[in-house]
Amino acid sequence: MLFRHALALLLALGLAACTSTPITGRSRLISAVPLTTELQLGVDAYSEAKSTSKLITSGPDFEMVQRIGQRVAVVAEQMVPEPTSAFEWEFILIDEPETANAWALPGGKTAVYTGLLPITQDEDGLAAVMGHEIAHAVLRHGTERMTQQVALQGFLGVASLGLGDMTASQRDVTMQALSGLGSLGVALPFSRAHESEADEVGLYFAAGAGYDPRAAIGLWERMAANAGGSSPPELLSTHPSHGTRIADLKAWMPTALDIYRKAGGTP
């Protein structure tokens, strides 16, 4: 009986979405976080990150990050005016040669680590990564995850109330099982959906900014080689597998190339 109730609540959570993401049309939960609060959270986290990082503030790599970021941000605002028109874009280059990463916070505060540049290799490759991160911010994936976590915690709280006749050990085992069910059935698929959506929308952003979208396929092939086979199975991961990402990019490529052509590129 309890298992059926848990499945019903998880299904209700999945059906609670009543808005759609721009461009992809994916159904999603309405954010419980006001945009003004989200933007301030981004400013606060960005200030802390800058204060604790070694920044590169001049030179060709710094200029490349600025150039790509500004061009992609212009296209992002054109394609998704709301909430992007409220963003105050900033782009930093963090000097960490061992870190192959990038991120974007709410409000467009974006960082690239120098360890990523040997993998991206050129502006087209870096544009694919920055487009992906910018898409996360534009599509408000961070606050959607926060809303989803609040909903899951509420579900677990309700489930806990229904376990009052169990012993403490039985209740602990059951709650652990329900928590695992929520993670495998909701949290991880949500995260993979966000990553996939950012891959697609970021590809279009970069293409619209005049960067060759085909570079994204080579980028993820190099990402896979850099990972060295250490990635967990896709079912247990917050990200799609490299193979899935490459296959998806190939499927989206005709649309991306059309955007690229309209932006003046040569498919």
Image (cartoon, rainbow, N blue to C red):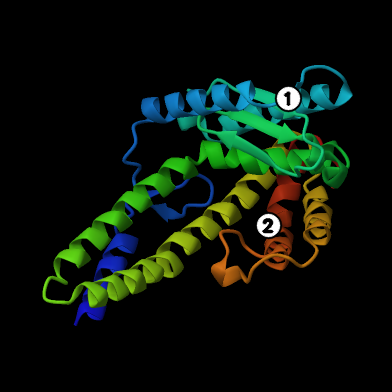
The residue that disc 2 covers is 252
Please tell me which of labels 2 and 1 falls first in the chain: 1
Residue at 60% over, 48% down: 198
Residue 76, picture quadrant:
top right
Q: Position of residue 68 (x, y in %)?
A: 75, 29
- How far apart are the two marked residues, 2 and 1, measured between alpha carbons? 37 Å
Judge left or right: residue 104 versus residue 112. Answer: left
Compared with 14, 61 (above or below) is above
User: Could you tell me residue 53's position as x and y percent?
Assistant: 68, 27
Q: Say left or right for 253 vs 267.
A: left
Regarding mark 1 in the picture, which secondary structure is present there?
Answer: loop
Q: Is residue 13 above or below residue 204?
A: below
CB-based contact (under 8 Å), mark 2 and mark 1? no
The dot on residue 54 is 1
Furthest toward the top, the residue is 58
Nearest the viewer among 77 and 184 is 184
